[in-house]
Every structure is written in structure tokens, then in C-alpha cells.
Amino acid sequence: MTPARRRPTGSTSRTRFPSLRRAATTIAATISASLLLSGCVFSVPATGNGSGNVSTPDASIAAAAPDGLREFYSQNVSWTSCEQGFQCANINVPIDYAKPDAGNISIAAIRLQSQGTKKGSLLVNPGGPGASGYDFVRDAAKTHFTSKLRSSFDLVGFDPRGVKRSAPVTCLSDAERDASREKVYTYNTDQGINAALADAKAVNAKCVEKSGPALAHIDTVSSAKDMDILRAVLNDAKLNYLGFSYGTSLGTTYASLFPDNVGKLVLDGAVDPALSMEDVTAGQAGAFESALRSYVADCQAKSGCPLTGSVDDGVRQIRDLVADVEQNPKRAKDGRLVTAATFVSAIFTPLYSNESWPVLTQALEAAVQGDDSLMLRIADFGADREPNGTYSSNTTFAFNAINCLDYPMVSDTAGMRAEEARLKEVSPTFGYYFAYGGINCKDWPYKSLHTPAPAKYTGTEPVVVIGTTGDPATPLAWAASLRKQLGDASLVTWKGEGHTAYGRSNRCVSDAVDNYFVDGKVPSDGTMC
């Protein structure tokens, strides 16, 4: 669950916003990665056909709709039983907010209704960009969120535009995705860069062909506007929202666009909106390097660790493993090729949660013996590839579409090589694999719509920002910076490892969040947990 905005793919050194595909909060990774290697599988509740109810926004909420959007704010929404114990609905929103009459798309939403005295709805986003909020609430609502929070709010997850069930960005078949992940590009040559650019251009053309007109509007500002329509059809005068990782970008954008509609807002694993993509990438590269050292130290303190000597020695041994795969890509037991980018992706994924570190140890132990099959299985998990060869999400494609619209990127060869040098300085292990992200967007058919800038929140409701000291995807410094941009906000810091805090840290964090949402008690700024 998601990620800062950049992360090595399992296929090439093109980068992505570090985010676990299935849940940016890493709860899914923590559970699923362990189950993956032990041979267990999730049991997903069956879809039901029970009756539901139709909700109609209060007249005063509909009357406050922005110009030209009254029909969307006043729409009746049918909530029907879908997954076991949940209700689902599709909410209509305009494709283009500048031309609301030019066509609609549907946003898929799911909710777990409050079992106590309801205070309202709590909208949740797990990150990405490109992660499914629908899946997150369905799979983790009853484990990731406390009973106190669930008894007071309807938990509502949604797939943002472009994601999975909501006008999904569609580009490649599953077989084509497998083939793409096995490609290797040599970025130290112009020929290698040109080959990567040609492939990216071809993929982008398929995205345009298969995704339709919504592809030009898969940006964070449009998604934040969708959230206000969701607020209205949920019959909430104010938006209560809990966003993780990239979900904090959605929350910050919403607060800037609709300051008077902000109710309770928690931003966990905060992204600094003032940073350029290049600064984001450098921050993450350094944070992942630090997280790797923390992992190595923990591994070496336990029996069975394949990394010997000092922490520096252990990190060097991992770099040697990566270098070996760079020179000699290996075949896994299923016959698929394990490239260096795939191998690095497998290192990254368990770093999102220290509870998943033993999974990485197990895979590295096998890799030292010459078998990279477990590394490939972890990388498959990060790419949302199922054991049967199918892909369970379109996160890879949604991620790229959103990033290309949200950020201007350095995409000329000289600029990308200069960025590579900078990244190698802050992260000798991973720097190369964070570089050359501009290749994805150089020939994207739509220009970026936004320029990074500090948040501009003028509302009166205090916001809560959460940071984690050992967060590899959203460094703690970003949370501190965002807190300053949001005026009367509070920063809560968890002294821990991994990405985000609520639902995977300690009672200090959960109490701070629950008491804020349920009781209206704002945690003290500077709270340490």
C-alpha cells in the first residue's frame, strides 16, 4: 500500500511511486507476503445478492454543489449487498470537470456500515497512486481499523478514477505484462535508452487505444473533486477522511480545493506536495537505503541470516547479489527470467513492513544458494501477479497515468543521467533503479496538468499528520513539512520501521487517531509514539 511515487518495477529500471499494490499501508503485504511463501492463500468473501438501500443527498448538500455539478451532487445512489457484510455502489462523476456535460464515468465504492451510534462516514484511501480502496476496505476493514472507529463510522473505500473498477486504465494483456517484466535496458548507452523509450511509447499508445477518453483526466485534482461528490451522496456535510501514502496527496488536494468541507482529516505516511518528482525520488532512494541497513542489522542479530560480518558487509553482499543478476539474469523454477530490476523489486517489497523482513531473509538465503525463485514470487506479489499468471489489478498502468498528469518530469537523456548520478550518491544500492522514471512520461499523450506547490489549506478544522521514523517510502521529513503547510495541524510520530503507522504500529497511534475521529480530541502537536 502505496507508495511514495517511485519504485523499481519487476521488469525494467523504470521506477514507480513506492507503494504496495494491494494496500499502501502495507497491511496486505505483511500478511500476504508471509502467506505467499508458506503456501497459504487468502479466502475472499463471496459476492452476495442481498437487498440494499437508496440514498438521496440532503437538499442543503445538493444545493451547495459547485456550478454545473448539481446533477452529480443530487444523484440517488443504490447501495446493494455485495461482499459478505458490505454494501457497494457506483457513483457517477464527470469525465472532465471543465466540461461536466461531456460524459460520465462511475466510481466504484464499498462500505462497511457502523455497528454503533453512527457519527458519519469515513472515506479511506490506501495509496498508490493506483491502489484499490475498494479492495482495501473489503479485505482489511475488520482487521486494520479498530472496533471503536468501526462502531462510530461507516467505513467507505473507493477505486479512484483510472483504478481497477472505476474507468480503469487498460494497456497490456497478462502475457504482455509478463514479457515486459523480463526486458532489460542498458541505460548507460543511447541505444538502451532509445529502446526503452520506444517500448514505453508503444505501451502508452495501447493505453490510449484501450482506456478511452477518461485517460486524459486520471489526475489527483480530478479524483479529489470526485471525493467531494462522494461526500455529498454519503449525506455528509463535512468529509471525514483517512489517507495513507499517496492517499495523503488526495487528502491534501481535497483540503486545498474544499477547505470549508473538511471535517476530520488524517494523513498517514505523508507526501510533501511542494517537492518535485526528482526531489521525491531522491528522498525515497535515501530512505530505502536506510531501511535496508535497518533490515540487515536486524537480520544479522538473528540466527539463520545469510548476511555475515558488519552491517556494511551485509549491505555489500546484497549489492553483490544484485550485480550478479545484472550480469547473469537467472531462470526461476517456473522458467521465467529474473532480471536485476525484478530482484531489486523483491528486496523493496518486504521493506515496507518489518513484519515482512523474515520473508526477505528466506528469499535471500535461497538466492545466495543460486535460486532466485522466491525473489521472483515476492516481486510477483508486488506486481499483483497471481500464481496462475493473471494480474489482479491495473495499478502499474494507473500509476503511470496519474504520475504523468500530476508531475512534470525530467525526460531528456542528459537530465536523466544527471539524476542517476545524484541518486547513486544518496543510495549506492538502489540509486540506479530509481533513475530514468522520465522515460515513462516522455511520450505520454497528455501533458502534465499540475506543478508541485505547498498545500494551501484555509479551513478551520485541524488536520492530523502522521509520520514514521523508519518509513522508506514517505520519509518522516515530508510529514514534518506537510504539517507546517496545513496551519493548525498536529504531527504524530511513530518510532518504528516500515511504511505508515495506523493499523500496524501501537496503541499510542491508534488511540490518537480514534480519539480524534470519534471524540474530537486533537492530539498534541509533536506527539511521539
Image (cartoon, rainbow, N blue to C red):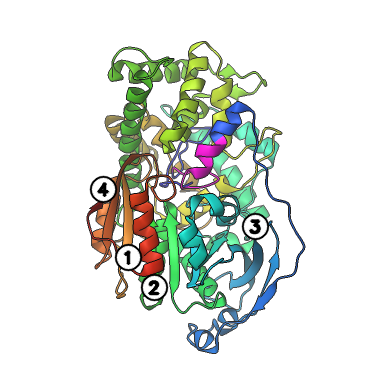
| Residue positioned 53% across, 77% down in the render | 232
Q: Which residue is mark 3?
A: 165
Q: Hey, what amino acid is under mark 1?
A: Val
Chain-order first, disc 2 or disc 4: 2
> Disc 2, disc 1: CB below 8 Å?
yes
Does the magenta run of residues contain 8? no
How far apart marks 2 and 4 lie (CA) works out to 24 Å
Does the magenta run of residues contain 23? yes
> Disc 4, disc 1: CB below 8 Å?
no
Chain-order first, disc 2 or disc 3: 3
| Residue positioned 51% across, 32% down in the render | 12
Q: Which residue is mark 1?
A: 463
How far apart marks 3 and 4 lie (CA) works out to 34 Å
Chain-order first, disc 1 or disc 3: 3
Q: Hey, what amino acid is under mark 3?
A: Arg
Q: Nearer the viewer, residue 242 or 127?
A: 242
Q: Which residue is mark 2?
A: 262
How far apart marks 2 and 3 lie (CA) works out to 26 Å
Q: Are there few (<14), some (14-19), or many (20+) residues within 10 Å of tag 4? A: some
How far apart marks 4 and 1 lie (CA) works out to 17 Å
Q: Nearer the viewer, mark 4 or mark 1?
A: 1
Magenta stretch in the rendered image: 18-32
Tell me the element at label 2: strand
> Disc 2, disc 4: CB below 8 Å?
no
From where the camera sits, is residue 492 visible? yes
Tell me the element at label 3: loop
Q: Which residue is mark 4?
A: 477
On the image, the x and y values in percent for residue 69 come to 54, 81
